[in-house]
Image (cartoon, rainbow, N blue to C red):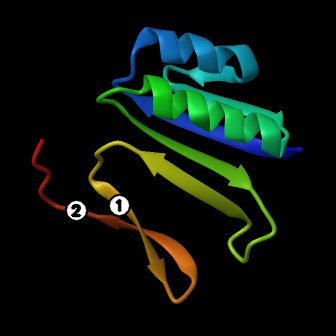
Amino acid sequence: MAMLTVVTENVPPRLRGRLAVWLLEIRAGVYVGDVSKRIREMVWEQVELMAEDGNVVMAWASNHESGFEFQTYGKNRREPIDYDGLRLVRYLPCFDN
């Protein structure tokens, strides 16, 4: 089991309701929980199926150098990049919808 955090923006209410089945919504669109890898992967499948035009980031505890991993869905000004094997986030100053 590992700590999981999911942050959503502009997603349909049905996805927010689905996430609330497995995770606790601590703020609007912010979900946390302690789940297995299987549940984490199933949650991500639901994100890909239901997020539509919204965007989502999911981060979880891991044994990597940073102590966590993350993945994103949808358009956002924050773009994950790989820098010598370390995942970082690049902030794009302009964003076209």
Q: Residue furthest bottom?
A: 84
Mark 1 in CB contact with mark 2 (< 8 angstroms) = yes
The residue type indicated by label 2 comes to Leu
Residue at figure coordinates x 68%, y 72% from the top left: 66
**Which percent across, then down, holds residue 4?**
71, 41
Mark 2 neighbour class, 10 Å CA radius: few under 14, some 14 to 19, many 20 or more: few
The residue where tag 2 is placed is 92
Q: Amino acid at mark 1?
A: Glu
Q: Farthest right residue?
A: 1
Residue 27: percent from left, percent from top: 55, 22
Marker disc for residue 79? 1
- Of residue 27 and residue 60, the one placed in the foreground of this image is 60
| Quadrant position of the N terminus in the picture | top right
**Image spot of residue 12 (x, y percent):** 39, 15
Query: What percent of the width, then of the height, locates residue 89?
Result: 42, 66
Q: Is residue 38 left or right of residue 31?
A: right
